[in-house]
Image (cartoon, grey):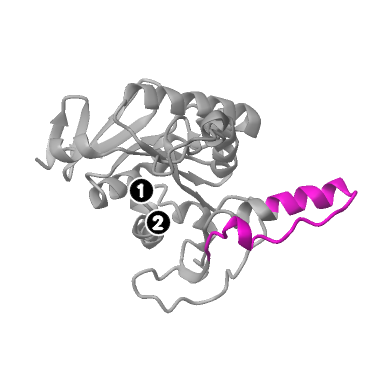
Amino acid sequence: MENGTAQNGTVHNAVCSSQSANGSCEVWSCNESDSSSADHLVIMVHGILGSSNDWKYAAERFVRNLPDKVFVHCSEKNMYRLTLDGVDVMGERLAQEVLEVIQKNPNLQKISFVAHSVGGLVARYAIGRLYRGPREDDAEEPNANPNKEQPRATIGGLEAVNFITVATPHLGSRGNKQWEDCLNEKYPHVVHEEHCKACDETDLAEPFSTDDKFDKIEEELVTGLSRVSWEKIDVSFHTSRLRLAAHSVIQVKDESMHIEGADVVQHLIDHFVL
């Protein structure tokens, strides 16, 4: 079924979606066998003065490409003028929203975040609030079975997999490699990719001794980043007629206007860890 109305929302190209009275949008496969096996929750967070509709195109593309893997929820707790309330306030709202989604979908096992602009900072805050480390009593049990699965940290009780941010000012907002040209035909706007594999604890540098609290904080941040794998992707729209609207094009905020950024969304999907 490709067009028409689903019981809880709309159907388009075998993708079902529903929108709550408050504005949240959820997207899943219309194929019952696919939707029942999808156990990976993808939380999409919009940017400043935005809404859940900003991620509509990407949400549908995610489900079309990964129909039996993902269930997508586009956040609605911080829409429009509520994005002016500050990262901490918005982060608390998002954390509560994520818990509500998880409670309504008990089959979920994994969780990932995809966020745009300031939404990436909000998602970072919410993740910190939802994070729960491995249970210390299990980890330190002296006679633990070596074949027993080791306790893991969770986000909202789910296994954390991807944290993806698009045009988020983690280190400020200065441009980087914005004037380079791309040679990749599949992703014409991707101009640079940087990958870093996670380091084992034994590979990490010994922490240096210092009385400067700022140096200690920096060392902790660098050490923390080294424990996980990460990718940094630079994109450029400097040749686009909509280059002044690149902040929206990169997200395909409006499909009719910003479709030029579709290759960036496809790059996210193709590199999404399941």
Range drawn in magenta: 196-221
> The residue tagged with tag 2: helix, strand or loop?
helix
Q: Which residue lies furthest to the bottom in this view?
A: 183
Q: In which image quadrant can residue 101 be found?
A: top left
Q: In which image quadrant can residue 159 be found?
A: top left
Specify whether 216 is left or right of 86: right
Q: Where is residue 262 in the image (x, y as percent from the top left)?
A: 36, 58
Q: Is residue 179 above or below residue 174?
A: below
The CA distance from mark 1 to mark 2 is 9 Å
Q: Position of residue 126 (x, y in %)?
A: 56, 33
The reply to whether residue 171 is visible in this rendering is no
* 166 or 101, nearer to the observer: 101
Q: Position of residue 78 (x, y in %)?
A: 52, 29
Q: Is residue 17 above or below residue 194?
A: above
* 167 or 143, nearer to the observer: 143
Q: Residue furthest left?
A: 1
Q: Which residue lies furthest to the right in this view?
A: 211
Q: Which amino acid does label 1 sit on?
A: Ala
Q: Tell me which residue sits at (37%, 62%) in the image.
A: 263
Numbered mark located on residue 268 in the image: 2
For the N terminus, the quadrant is: top left
Q: Position of residue 216 (x, y in %)?
A: 80, 49
Which residue bears the numbered disc 1? 58
The reply to whether residue 98 is visible in this rendering is yes
Mark 1 touches mark 2? (CB < 8 Å): yes
Question: Sequence order check: which comes first, mark 1 or mark 2?
Answer: 1
Q: In which image quadrant can residue 82 be found?
A: top right
